Image (cartoon, rainbow, N blue to C red):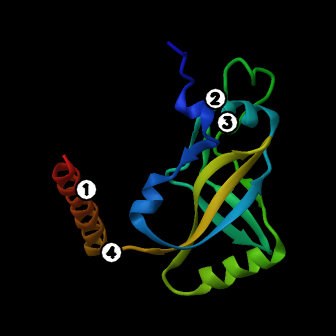
């Protein structure tokens, strides 16, 4: 029997923000680099990050990731005073920042991170320009998802 690798090691995804996909309509996606310190990279390799309540702040033609919680490893960061929720700078092109700023200035739009992932040896953050969902939109999404699941069951049972 062959030894199977863990699914987490095969994929480049470090963390997902599932709450953002539930609470918002995703209008436009961007890929941004992330400025990190050494202990943060080690923690990301271990998967010790949460994006649930994080958001992107656009200020002075720069983008910053706020609220992302990267837990410090006890073995890696003994000599450093680690702040798990510090503000991290996002690396974007000027025209991408301009698109985000004009989008956020419209009523009902926000900018949130969707995922952190590896691209080669670099950490990338997928951010999105999003529009908030109302409660009835969330219920409609759940109904559509259940209906799609039911259709797949019917098709699968009829093929047998």
As measured in the structure, the alpha-carbon distance from the residue carrying label 3 to the one carrying label 4 is: 33 Å
| Mark 2 in CB contact with mark 1 (< 8 angstroms) | no
Task: Point out residue 89 in the picture as x, y percentages from the top left corner.
Answer: 77, 57
Counting residues from the start of the chain, the first of labels 4 and 2 encountered is: 2
Task: Point out residue 136 in the picture as x, y percentages from the top left corner.
Answer: 25, 74
Graded by Cα atoms within 10 Å as few (under 14), some (14 to 19) or many (20 or more), the crowding at tag 2 reads few
Tell me which residue sits at (79%, 28%) in the image. 80
Task: Point out residue 86 in the picture as x, y percentages from the top left corner.
Answer: 69, 47
The residue labelled by disc 1 is 152
As measured in the structure, the alpha-carbon distance from the residue carrying label 3 to the one carrying label 2 is: 5 Å
In the rendered image, the vertical position of residue 27 relative to residue 3, given as above or below: below
Tell me which residue sits at (76%, 20%) in the image. 78
Pick the front one: 40 or 145: 145
| Mark 3 in CB contact with mark 2 (< 8 angstroms) | yes
The residue labelled by disc 2 is 46
In the rendered image, the vertical position of residue 64 relative to residue 86, given as above or below: below
Graded by Cα atoms within 10 Å as few (under 14), some (14 to 19) or many (20 or more), the crowding at tag 3 reads many
Graded by Cα atoms within 10 Å as few (under 14), some (14 to 19) or many (20 or more), the crowding at tag 4 reads few
Determine if residue 47 is in view.
no
Task: Point out residue 109 in the picture as x, y percentages from the top left corner.
Answer: 53, 78
Left or right: where 3 falls relative to 141: right
Left or right: where 92 falls relative to 65: right
Tell me which corner region of the image, top left, top right, bottom left or bottom right, holds residue 120.
Answer: top right
């Amino acid at each position: 029997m062959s030894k199977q690798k863990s699914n987490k090691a095969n994929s480049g995804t470090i963390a997902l923000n599932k709450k953002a996909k539930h609470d918002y309509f995703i209008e436009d996606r961007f890929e941004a680099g992330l400025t990190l310190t050494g202990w943060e990279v080690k923690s990301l390799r271990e998967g010790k990050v949460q994006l649930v309540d994080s958001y992107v702040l656009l200020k002075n033609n720069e983008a910053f990731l706020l609220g992302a919680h990267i837990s410090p490893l006890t073995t890696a960061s003994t000599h450093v005073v680690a702040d798990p929720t510090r503000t991290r700078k996002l690396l974007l092109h000027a025209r991408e920042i301009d698109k985000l700023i004009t989008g956020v200035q419209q009523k009902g739009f926000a900018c949130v991170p969707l995922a952190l992932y590896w691209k080669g040896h670099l950490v990338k953050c997928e951010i999105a320009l999003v529009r908030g969902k109302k409660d009835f939109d969330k219920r409609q999404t759940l109904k559509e998802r259940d209906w799609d699941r039911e259709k797949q069951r019917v098709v699968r049972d009829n093929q047998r």
